[in-house]
Image (cartoon, rainbow, N blue to C red):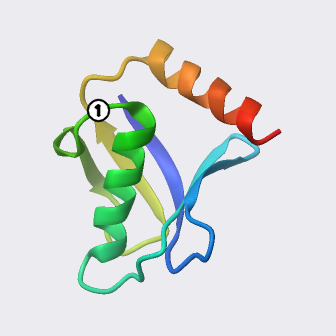
């Protein structure tokens, strides 16, 4: 599965939320030496219940908008995670 997310590095409130149809990943780590990217991978892996090694950044290593590939997650599981996110953050 491939997905596009917006990243907020250096956030005081880390977590995953939605802004319309966009998934937003807020992480405490700053965008220095790849720390924010590693935190994004860990956050998405936890949210989608897969190992961090199954999440890779395809595009946007230095940008706030990133394209990621997630192995082991089908569209149905992703939509269920989005629905759970919508219920948690109405």
Image spot of residue 37 (x, y percent)? 33, 66
What residue lies at 32% left-to-right and 86% top-to-bottom? Answer: 32
What residue lies at 49% left-to-right and 24% top-to-bottom? Answer: 78
Q: Residue furthest bottom?
A: 32
What residue lies at 37% left-to-right and 72% top-to-bottom? Answer: 36
User: Which quadrant is the N terminus positioned in?
Assistant: top left
Image spot of residue 76 (x, y percent)? 49, 13
The number of numbered discs placed on residues in the rendered structure image is 1
Q: Is residue 88 left or right of residue 28?
A: right
Q: Is residue 58 above or below residue 13?
A: above
Q: Is residue 58 left or right of residue 63?
A: left
Determine whether the residue tagged by mark 1 lies in a helix, strand or loop.
Answer: loop
Q: Is any part of residue 37 visible from this angle?
A: yes
Q: Is residue 8 left or right of residue 39?
A: right
Location of residue 39 by image quarter: bottom left
Image spot of residue 63 (x, y percent)? 43, 72
Nearer-the-camera pick, 7 or 51? 51
Nearer-the-camera pick, 86 or 56? 86
Residue denoted by label 1: 50
Q: Is any part of residue 60 visible from this angle?
A: no
Q: Is residue 80 above or below residue 23?
A: above
Q: Residue furthest right?
A: 90
């Amino acid at each position: 599965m491939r997905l596009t997310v917006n990243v907020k590095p250096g956030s005081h409130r880390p977590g995953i939320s939605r802004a319309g149809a966009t998934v937003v990943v807020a992480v405490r780590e700053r965008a220095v030496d790849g720390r924010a990217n590693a935190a994004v991978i860990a956050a998405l892996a936890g949210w989608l219940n897969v190992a961090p090694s199954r999440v890779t950044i395809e595009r946007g290593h230095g940008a706030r908008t990133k394209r990621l590939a997630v192995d082991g997650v089908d569209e149905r599981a992703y939509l269920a995670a989005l629905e759970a996110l919508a219920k948690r953050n109405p």
